[in-house]
Image (cartoon, rainbow, N blue to C red):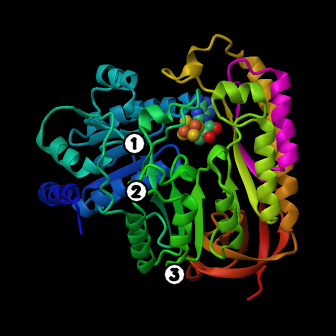
Amino acid sequence: MLNQEEKLQSEYIDKLKEIVKNKENALSRKLTCQVTTFGCQMNARDSEKLLGILKEAGFEETESDEADFVIYNTCTVRDNANQRVYGRLGALKPIKQRNKDMKIALCGCMTQEQSVIDKLKKSYNFVDLIFGTHNLFCFAELLYRMYTEEKQIVEVWDKTDVIAERLPVDRKYPFKSGINIMFGCNNFCTYCIVPYVRGRERSRKPEEIIEEITKLSADGVNEVMLLGQNVNSYGKNLENPVSFAELLREVEKIDGIKRIRFMTSHPKDLSDELIEVMRDSGKLCKHIHLPLQSGSDRILKAMNRVYNKEQYIDLALKIRKAIPDISITTDIIVGFPGETREDVMETVDVINRVKFDNAFTFIYSKRTGTPAAAMENQVSESEVKENFDIVLTAVQNMAKEQLGRFLGETVEVLCEGLNEQDDSCVDGRMSQNIIVHFKGDESMIGKYFKVRLSDFHGFYYDGEIVE
Ligand code: 5AD
Ligand code: SF4
């Protein structure tokens, strides 16, 4: 059953269908749309919703910048993501000058910042529609307004209580899907802009999540990725509190779901109950992404991460002990204000002791409005560069050693698509989130195979099907 908001948006989709039809008739062709995603898995999922509504309204998807409607779903976690969006927008301007009917929209985390809105209004007045993360569910209504009101529409909210998830979605993969289980973040790590642009933590009710996954399973999905900024604190603020581990136990019971993943865990909230579920489950993947950010107690404190180096190492080793074949990946920030070479060597020590299977390493990016941006001891670019190379080398050396440890084993892989370089081969994914290339064809996509890992190439395997 649709809730009130979902019904309202469905009515707007019907109105849009008419507008699109009329335009099609006038142009004697289909209208095209391009949806471009920047940033994380949450944004990727949001983009599937944008595309779902556009397709339902009658648009055809294209990758071309010459589309009738272009929307950028933006990220602002680091400044280079913002700069890429401004660059792409600049390139669209001459295209729009040639095609007066073209419409351009911007949404996502960037537009939640007032400074961005000011800049867009001043220097990018050719953008027709700007909205934020809290009113993405109003996309159909906003599109309708964009086509019926001849002015730039800027509609950004600073929060919402509405959860409207039962609207059209166009999934990128037929066999796997992300599912939002919660929105926002309450942690306020001092470098991070997410709590300001995504708002406070809100969990979806377990029964709604189960209903969505059951439907996805009936629609051919066999792998789900439960999404949230901090899934370990899922359910704490619900009227009837539920733990993340309890939610996982329920998801496990859904027929047809073979693999369950989740993203992202905060070390401070990771429970023993979760480790037990992961250990005992036949469906939970043997992979956990557990952001470290820094190995230095001093820096962790300044970051407001609420754990110290030894606590992190103890937790990671406890997970490894319970689930020996698990892969542990992480995020690391280099160049946080006040970080010295000594601090960086503490981070390297954690890399070596935890033996991360892989890590995303980021250069600290100053985000206006966050406490860290106002800290006085910002580190010079040259120092950061040197420290970044030290961390990256440690990560790469460890990843090579760790990822290669499955050579010769026979593992289950999900075939995800044809290999881009060699179309007589397919790419599969192990439970540990490692890619395997093996002989195959399109008919195998979305299915599981037992594959012997015959060769290791640094970050992926070649394999042979055993059965
Ligand atoms: N600078 C650099 N990296 C950041 N991250 C979050 N904020 C910043 C920032 N200001 C990184 C963290 C987080 C990941 C999603 O992005 O490592 O885990
Ligand atoms: Fe940002 Fe910290 Fe929340 Fe992650 S947990 S989104 S790093 S504030």
Instruction: Report x, y in % for residue 465.
Output: 75, 83
Q: Amino acid at mark 3?
A: Gly
Task: Please name whichever residue, 207 or 374, is drawn nearer the observer in this view of the structure.
Answer: 207
Work out whether mark 3 precedes mark 1 in sequence or the reverse, and give the earlier one. 1
Q: Nearer the viewer, mark 2 or mark 3?
A: 2
Q: Tell me, for residue 405, which label it has, or none.
A: none
Q: Is residue 285 visible?
A: no
**Can you tell me which quadrant of the image ligand 1 is in?**
top right
Does 362 lie within the magenta span? no
Disc 1 to disc 2, C-alpha distance: 26 Å
- With 8 as the anchor, is 313 left or right in this view? right
* Marks 2/3: CA–CA distance: 22 Å
289 sits left or right of 210 in the view = right
| 262 is higher (above) or lower (below) than 300 | below
Which region shows up in magenta? 333-361
Find residue 360 and report its horizontal and vertical position in percent: 69, 43
Q: Residue furthest top?
A: 376
Horizontal side of 35 relative to 246 (left or right) equals left
Q: Is 375 drawn above or below residue 287 in the view shown?
A: above
Above/below status of 401 relative to 79? below
What's under tag 2, amino acid-wise? Answer: Arg
Does residue 43 sit above or below 457 in this rendering? above
Indicate the amino acid at tag 1: Tyr
Name the residue at the bottom extreme.
467
Q: Is residue 230 visible?
A: yes
Per the image, the residue denoted by label 1 is: 72
Mark 2 / mark 3, whichever is N-terminal: 2
Residue 25 coordinates in the image, percent (x, y): 13, 59
Task: Say which residue label 3 marks.
Answer: 256
State the residue position of label 2. Answer: 204
